[in-house]
């Protein structure tokens, strides 16, 4: 694994404080708060530590309640809501400074055979033909008000090889287009040994799922986003459904669109496919999307 991926996996390896209580480290995102995908992934790790062996998450629903403090650890308390014959339900509350900052409910299931169908995978170029972040970011350096922003963006995402199919919002400011965005992603390195288990792949994909989902909201209005300063935003809630097994260290296509934006909020919808066309995840997120005064 790369050093960055090793660091991310270590971040997800929570300390057990006592039964059903775990503690995780924090680190700053590009903005001065904890990245929402980190909190969601750590909360899912905490929940899965209490689930009977052989059961994997099939869905999670979460709310971001307060900004996370990157300078303080996060305590995760797990409530064992139900253990049924096929399904297990858990609730997790993440706390900092005595206040809840995040709430997650997840359901896990023992694998079983059933009816099968799915929508077809949308067309997308091969990820090997697309520019890496290292190739792409220098092209747009002059678009950022903060000259350090490209470096900070790359640093925040260095554990993930993420490649945009078309220009990202920060490169499309002032040019409204179809509210749809596609990225290919995989971890920056292979998982092996004890870390190569289905739960870790699910948690890593959960981490990435919060990176770009609201891009399509910005594209519809020709906004570059918080990275260029023409929008103030934050995640409000996050919902994931895990349909089929996958590996986070192999290419996944994240096809994203925005059906609506209103009231200072925008809705993002995503579907994640393996390279061979299997639909493995569905994602929905609502976020704050506000235009600063003087830029409306």
Image: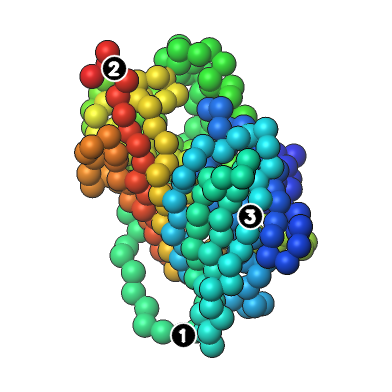
Colour setup of the view: rainbow
Q: Position of residue 281 (x, y in %)?
A: 44, 60
Q: Are marks 1 and 3 in contact (CB under 8 Å)?
A: no
Question: Where 192 sits versus 4, above or below?
Answer: below
Q: Is residue 123 visible?
A: no
Q: Is disc 2 placed on a helix, strand or loop? A: loop
Number of the front mark, 1 or 2: 2
**On residue 293, which mark appears?**
2
Compared to 276, does 151 lie above or below? Answer: above
Snapshot quadrant of residue 240:
bottom left
In front of the other: 252 or 204: 204
Residue 254 appears left or right of 218: right
Q: Which mark is residue 76?
A: 3
When asked about the image quadrant of residue 214, the answer is top left
Tag 3 secondary structure: strand
Residue 274 lies, with reference to residue 157, above or below; the image says below
Q: Nearer the viewer, mark 1 or mark 3?
A: 3
- Of callouts 2 and 3, the N-terminal one: 3
Q: Residue at the spot x=53%, y=84% of the render?
A: 84
Left or right of 235, for residue 6? right
What residue sits 50% from the left and 65% below the top? 106
Mark 1 nearby-residue class (10 Å; few <14, some 14–19, many ≥20): few
Q: Are marks 1 and 2 in contact (CB under 8 Å)?
A: no
Q: Which mark is residue 295?
A: none
């Amino acid at each position: 694994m790369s050093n960055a991926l090793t660091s991310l996996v270590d971040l997800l390896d929570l300390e057990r404080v006592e039964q059903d209580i775990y503690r995780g480290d924090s680190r700053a995102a590009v903005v001065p708060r904890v990245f929402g995908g980190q909190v969601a992934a750590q909360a899912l790790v905490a929940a899965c530590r209490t689930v009977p062996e052989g059961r994997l998450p099939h869905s999670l629903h979460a709310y971001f309640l307060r900004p996370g403090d990157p300078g303080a650890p996060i305590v995760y308390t797990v409530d064992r809501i139900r253990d049924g014959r096929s399904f297990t339900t858990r609730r997790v509350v993440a706390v900092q400074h005595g206040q809840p900052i995040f709430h997650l409910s997840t359901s896990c299931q023992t694998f079983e055979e059933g009816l099968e169908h799915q929508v077809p995978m949308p067309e997308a170029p091969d990820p090997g033909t697309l520019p890496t972040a290292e190739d792409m970011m220098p092209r747009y350096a002059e678009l950022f008000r903060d000259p350090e922003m490209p470096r900070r963006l790359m640093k925040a995402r260095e554990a993930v090889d993420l490649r945009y199919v078309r220009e990202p919002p920060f490169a499309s400011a002032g040019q409204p287009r179809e509210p749809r965005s596609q990225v290919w992603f995989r971890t920056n390195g292979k998982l092996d040994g004890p870390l190569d288990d289905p739960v870790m792949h699910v948690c890593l994909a959960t981490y990435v799922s919060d990176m770009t989902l609201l891009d399509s909201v910005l594209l519809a209005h020709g906004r570059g986003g918080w990275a260029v300063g023409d929008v103030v935003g934050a995640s409000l809630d996050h919902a994931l459904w895990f349909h089929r097994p996958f590996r986070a260290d192999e290419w996944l296509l994240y096809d994203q669109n925005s059906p609506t934006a209103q009231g200072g909020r925008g809705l993002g919808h995503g579907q994640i496919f393996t390279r061979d066309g299997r639909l493995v995840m569905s994602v929905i997120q609502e976020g704050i999307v506000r235009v600063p005064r003087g830029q409306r």
